[in-house]
Image: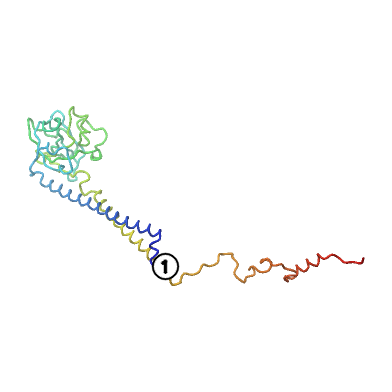
Amino acid sequence: MYRFLLTPRWWGINIFAVLAIPVCLLMGSWQLSRFDDRVERHQAQQEHSRDAAHAEAEPLSSLLPLTEDTVGRTAKVTGRFDAGHPLLVPDRSLKDERGFYVLSLLRTDETKDGKAVPVVRGWLPGGADPARVPAPPKGEVTVRGVVQAAESQNDAGPHAVGALPKGQLGFISAAALVNVVPYGVEDAWLTEQRTEKPLRPVPPVAPDGTGLDMKAFQNLGYTAQWFVFAGFVVFMWFRFFRREAELAKDAALGLIPEESPEPGSPEPGSPRSPTGSAAGLPEGDGGRPGSSAEDAAGRSRSPVGPA
């Protein structure tokens, strides 16, 4: 009854199902593991943010170059602030209040090639006004702050794009600072959590791809999608199998109807059936069989007349 499973057509269907189901389950599990990793990294970042002000600081050189594990850690570095290049980062919000970052560059020998370290000393509300910004500490200082990944143009505020006034920066990165200062800058920055008034500390943020953002929930959606695909393959295989099994059962019981004659073909006994002249039989007057043959024989006789 199930011999149809051995046909070439069903060999192809079975092989496809056997390969497709594990692939769908594997891809769904992989997407789920990515979502779990994002959740764990988000929780770790939240813990680092809560404990940033009291966490034990590590030498910055040991955390560079940055990785997903070192972003958000508390670091310390010793150097001197460059008072000749004060910078402001406008259009930055803190607790739904619009303001700006106060950015200073720390010259140090503790980084590779002596690159300077961008330090966000704090945040102030309102428009970017250098007159309201306190001067950075003089002399050699040790800065403690949370390590943050370099920003991109997408991180700039909606009004902090295009040409900005001198002394302002749209986003914090070495690429944005290369034409601002005459020395090398690390492609990372620190945000101080213990600031002097009136500056407010800027809370650290999770780097792109590590928090519970839209991409994280896309991974969760892809997980459900792959599992649905696996269930769909099982459903369609069972549906095809049940149909073939019913057809095979009906054939075994003789319940499959005979094929009907093609449209336009004459039925047996109909006037168009192969009888008479249609069958190749000669017809005479009135359709009497053989009459035409007798008439032809009479006409072929030679006329007999008087000598």
Query: Which corner quadrant holds the N terminus?
Result: bottom left
Task: Please tell me which residue lies in front, 113 or 44.
Answer: 113
Q: Give the labeled residue for mark 1.
A: 248
Q: Is residue 298 left or right of residue 234?
A: right
Are there few (<14), some (14-19), or many (20+) residues within 10 Å of tag 1?
some
Name the residue type under label 1: Ala
What secondary structure is marked by label 1?
helix
Q: Is residue 88 above or below residue 294?
A: above
The extreme top residue here reads 182
* Quadrant of residue 25 within the rendered picture: bottom left
Measured from the top left, where is residue 256 in percent x and y? 46, 69
Counting the numbered discs, the total is: 1
**Which of the two residues, 175 or 271, is positioned nearer the viewer here?**
271
Place of residue 91 in the rendered image (x, y in percent of width and height, measured from the top left): 21, 39
Q: Quadrant of the C terminus?
A: bottom right
Residue 244 at what x, y percent from top left? Answer: 40, 65
The answer to whether any part of residue 197 appears in the image is: no
Residue at image position (42%, 67%) is 248
In the image, is 246 to the left or to the right of 55?
right
Point 60% across, 70% down: residue: 268
Q: Which residue is the extreme one toward the right? A: 307
Classify residue 184 by image quadrant: top left
Give whichever of 278, 203 is nearer the camera: 278
> 59 and 257: which one is in front?
257
Vertical position of residue 50 compared to residue 180: above or below? below
Q: Can you tell which quarter of the image residue 246 is in?
A: bottom left
- Residue 260, visible in the rendered structure: yes
